[in-house]
């Protein structure tokens, strides 16, 4: 337990039943000097069994995880659980409230703040509490993301490629139980400090997701999140409402291991795509072109794929900026 954490809560992590509460994180405002910012938390526990840490709203403009986990906390009763669910539906609540990827209180990306420090800014203090108080209690960690406003994805459950093959194959088994169309092995091309990276480094069975994008928020993506999460929990026997059924068809296992699989915009402007999601891609192929907003009649700048595969991710808003990822290419992956 993180005895040096400045975050407090009335939640008792050893108690059976359903508890609804908050994490109180010190945060002063111009209108409130002695103040805390409340991060919602729920614990549903029944007897012994695995502990599953579930988070949504790591990025505030990604609402699939927030809605799925809020519904889960309302719907699931302790008698349907064997073990413990610790649920943080709005991990970066300041960003969720603002509808932004980054926290408006300190400008930080929660998913680059791990493991955080006890006397950090608010984002780092939340990360620190998760890292040193919650993650040590967890066997399975699920952090639900989607493309938000910045990217769109074919729906996937994802993870990094790990050196520990035992951990990796168990994570692929858990991801497969989810039943999203894809299980996606990704690489970090925009910095470290991710919640899933830290959880993986502790040896936890760690799953992330990328479910569509803000414009795709709806019945299909929420269904993949809700059905998949529950199916994975049933496979581990943590959710006992109905028996586990392996998904059919089984997800496709794909990976984007090379930095060149993440194509960055060479210039700022309007990205015009030439391919639809899921289309095959050859190395060297034109993925699209970028129109300048400053020199509108200048020739558009082409964007080329450097690797081949299928188009798995694409920029979620046409107006892009130099250095932003506009396309992600994946290829089939086989566990060694
Ligand atoms: Zn995200």
Image (tube, grey):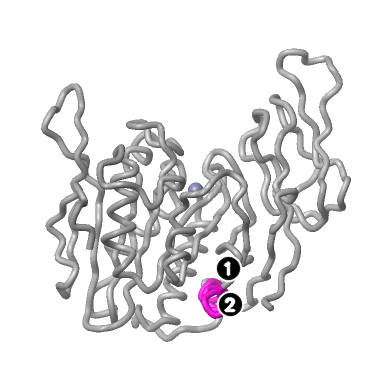
Please provide percent x and percent y for residue 200: 47, 65
Q: Which residues are magenta?
A: 164-177
Q: Residue at x 83, y 53 (%)?
A: 281
Q: Is residue 276 magenta?
A: no
Q: Residues within 10 Å of mark 1 (few under 14, many from 20)?
A: some
Q: Are marks 2 and 1 in contact (CB under 8 Å)?
A: yes
**Which of the numbered marks, if any, corresponds to residue 126?**
none
In the figure, is residue 177 to the left or right of 80? right
In this figure, which residue is indicated by the disc labeled 1? 162
Foreground: 142 or 130?
130
Q: Secondary structure at mark 1?
A: loop
Answer yes or no: disc 2 within 8 Å of ligand 1: no
Q: Quadrant of residue 99?
A: top left
Q: Residue at x 77, y 56 (%)?
A: 310
Q: Secondary structure at mark 2?
A: helix
In this figure, which residue is indicated by the disc labeled 2? 165
Between the residue at mark 2 and the residue at mark 1, the CA separation in whole angstroms equals 7 Å
Q: Residues within 10 Å of mark 2 (few under 14, many from 20)?
A: few
Q: Residue at x 31, y 56 (%)?
A: 130
**Magenta stretch: dominant SS?**
helix
Q: Quadrant of residue 45?
A: bottom left
Q: Residue at x 59, y 51 (%)?
A: 188
Which quadrant of the rendered structure holds the N terminus? bottom left
Please provide percent x and percent y for residue 288: 80, 37
Q: Quadrant of residue 252?
A: bottom right
Whether residue 58 is situated above or below residue 316 in the rendered picture:
below
Whether residue 222 is situated above or below residue 190 in the rendered picture:
below
Please provide percent x and percent y for residue 136: 31, 67
In the figure, is residue 134 to the left or right of 150? left
Please provide percent x and percent y for residue 64: 45, 53
Which quadrant of the rendered structure holds the C terminus? bottom right
């Amino acid at each position: 337990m993180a005895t040096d954490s400045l975050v407090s809560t009335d939640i008792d992590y050893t108690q059976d039943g359903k508890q609804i509460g908050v994490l109180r994180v010190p945060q002063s405002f111009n209108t409130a000097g002695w103040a805390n910012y409340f991060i919602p938390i729920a614990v549903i526990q029944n007897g012994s069994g695995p502990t599953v840490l579930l988070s949504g709203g790591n990025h505030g403009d990604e609402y699939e995880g927030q809605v799925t986990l809020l519904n889960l906390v309302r719907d699931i009763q302790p008698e349907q659980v064997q073990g413990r669910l610790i649920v943080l539906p709005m991990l970066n609540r300041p960003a969720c409230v603002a509808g932004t990827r980054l926290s408006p209180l300190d400008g930080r990306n929660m998913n680059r703040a791990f493991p955080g420090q006890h006397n950090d800014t608010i984002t780092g203090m939340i990360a620190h509490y998760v890292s040193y108080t919650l993650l040590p209690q967890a066997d399975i960690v699920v952090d639900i993301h989607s493309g938000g406003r910045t990217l769109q994805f074919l729906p996937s459950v994802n993870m990094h490629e790990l050196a520990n093959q035992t951990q990796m194959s168990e994570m692929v088994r858990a991801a497969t139980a989810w039943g999203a169309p894809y299980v996606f092995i990704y690489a970090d091309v925009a910095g470290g400090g991710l919640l899933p990276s830290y959880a993986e480094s502790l040896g936890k069975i760690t799953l992330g997701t990328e479910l569509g994008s803000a414009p795709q928020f709806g019945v299909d993506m929420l269904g993949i999140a809700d059905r998949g999460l529950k199916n994975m929990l049933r496979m581990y026997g943590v959710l006992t409402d109905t028996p586990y059924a392996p998904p059919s068809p089984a997800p496709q296992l794909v990976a984007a291991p090379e930095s060149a699989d993440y194509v960055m915009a060479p210039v700022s402007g309007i990205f015009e795509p030439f391919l639809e999601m899921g289309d095959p891609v050859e190395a060297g192929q034109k993925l699209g072109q970028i129109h300048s907003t400053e020199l509108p009649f200048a020739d558009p700048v082409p964007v080329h794929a450097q690797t081949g595969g299928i188009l798995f991710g694409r920029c979620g808003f046409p107006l892009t900026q130099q250095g932003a990822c506009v396309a992600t290419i994946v290829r089939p992956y086989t566990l060694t």
